[in-house]
Image: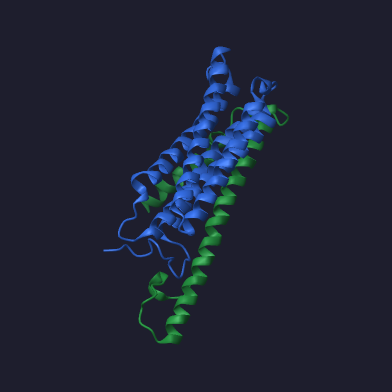
Chain colours: A blue, B green
């Protein structure tokens, strides 16, 4: 039995079940990050000094490029799948995963640098909120990587709904991934540039 | 009568102890403190985020209403049975 509106859009809402679910999830994520950003602003505005220069702006800019490239490849992968080109789709999705992993590697090097300088979450409020925000974002990246790996592996086999279901799965993933991108841009501005 | 007297008593007690309503012992009475500015900025950011999410929810609700109305209109004009499910059982918003 096929669940209604898993693939075709519901006529009155114009959304599939998955789209609605993903937007609700993203709304809850916006509230989560919004509360943390608000906490950051309170700490930042109230602080008499703020050790922003302790952060590696070069690594952050490199990570921005890596993450944007990953999103671009995900969009290309979706376009290939829509055109029925399975091999380019898989290659591009794999490249998107690889870039996401590179993001995590660069981030871990950044963390290592701080830990070697004894800049730990307990050092001061700046590092406490820095590790909280970037760590939570890195967890979201790791979650996205797992979903994309699933789509490359077991999840690539469409169920009874056919190949259209795979395209929708990829669309939901892309929606999430663009959100993670947007959060990173906010982090870049708040943590590294402000 | 006894219940109303209890409620009135509670209200009077709350009004008499207004110091309980002074929510923020950090910034109360110090208008220029940096903590004040920081908390104000934080509240503005949080309000902005909440407003953006609520605006999205409201726009989606409007979209649902329009979709439901259009589907109900289609049902009425085509004389079709409920092959297009609408919200509220097909009633207009």
Quadrant of the image occupied by residue A5: bottom left
* Between B46 and A102, the one nearer to me in the picture: A102
Image quarter in which the N terminus of chain B is found: bottom left
Front residue (pair A73, A113): A73
Along the horizontal axis of the image, is A34 left or right of B80? right
- Residue A80 against residue A32 in the figure, above or below: below
Left or right of residue A119: residue A147: left
Relative to B30, is B65 on the left or the right? Answer: left
Q: Confirm whether residue A86 shows in the render.
A: yes
**Percent x, y for residue A26?**
49, 48
Q: What residue appears at the point 60 percent right and 31 percent down from the top-left corner?
A: A40
Residue in the image at 46% along x and 33% along y: A139
Please indicate whether residue A153 sits to the left or right of residue A25 in the image: left
Residue found 45% across the figure and 51% down from its top: A170
Q: Position of residue A87 (x, y in %)?
A: 45, 49
Outermost residue to the left: A1
Give percent across and percent down for residue A67.
57, 38
Residue A194 in sight in this render: no
Please determine whether, in this image, residue A41 is positioned above or below residue B47.
above
The vertical placement of A17 against B45, above or below, is below
Residue lying farthest to the right in this orientation: B32
Residue at 59%, 28% (x, y): give it. B25
Percent coordinates x, y for residue B67 in the rendering: 49, 71
Q: Nearer the viewer, residue B4 or B65?
A: B65
- Judge whether A153 appears above or below A19 on screen: above
């Amino acid at each position: 039995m096929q669940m209604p509106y898993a693939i075709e859009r519901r006529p009155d809402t114009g959304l599939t079940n998955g789209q609605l679910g993903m937007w609700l999830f993203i709304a809850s994520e916006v509230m989560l990050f919004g509360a943390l950003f608000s906490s950051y602003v309170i700490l930042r505005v109230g602080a008499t000094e703020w050790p922003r220069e302790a952060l590696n702006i070069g690594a952050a800019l490199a990570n921005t490029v890596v993450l944007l490239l990953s999103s671009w490849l995900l969009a290309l992968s979706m376009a290939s799948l829509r055109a029925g080109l399975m091999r380019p789709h898989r290659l591009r999705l794999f490249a998107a995963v690889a870039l996401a992993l590179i993001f995590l590697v660069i981030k871990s090097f950044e963390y290592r640098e701080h830990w070697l300088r004894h800049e730990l979450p307990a050092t001061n409020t700046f590092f406490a909120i820095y590790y909280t925000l970037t760590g939570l974002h890195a967890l979201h990246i790791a979650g996205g990587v797992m979903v994309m790996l699933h789509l490359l592996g077991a999840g690539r086999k469409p169920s009874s709904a056919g190949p259209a279901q795979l395209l929708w799965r990829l669309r939901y993933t892309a929606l999430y991934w663009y959100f993670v991108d947007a959060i990173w841009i906010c982090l870049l501005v708040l943590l590294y540039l402000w | 009568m006894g219940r109303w007297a209890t409620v009135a008593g509670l209200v009077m007690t709350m009004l008499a102890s207004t110091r309980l309503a002074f929510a923020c012992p950090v910034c109360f009475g110090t208008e220029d403190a940096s903590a004040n500015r920081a908390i104000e900025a934080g509240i503005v950011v949080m309000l902005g985020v909440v407003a953006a999410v609520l605006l999205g929810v409201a726009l989606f609700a409007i979209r649902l209403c329009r979709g439901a109305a259009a589907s109900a209109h289609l049902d009425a004009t085509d004389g079709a049975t409920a092959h297009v499910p609408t919200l509220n059982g097909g009633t207009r918003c």
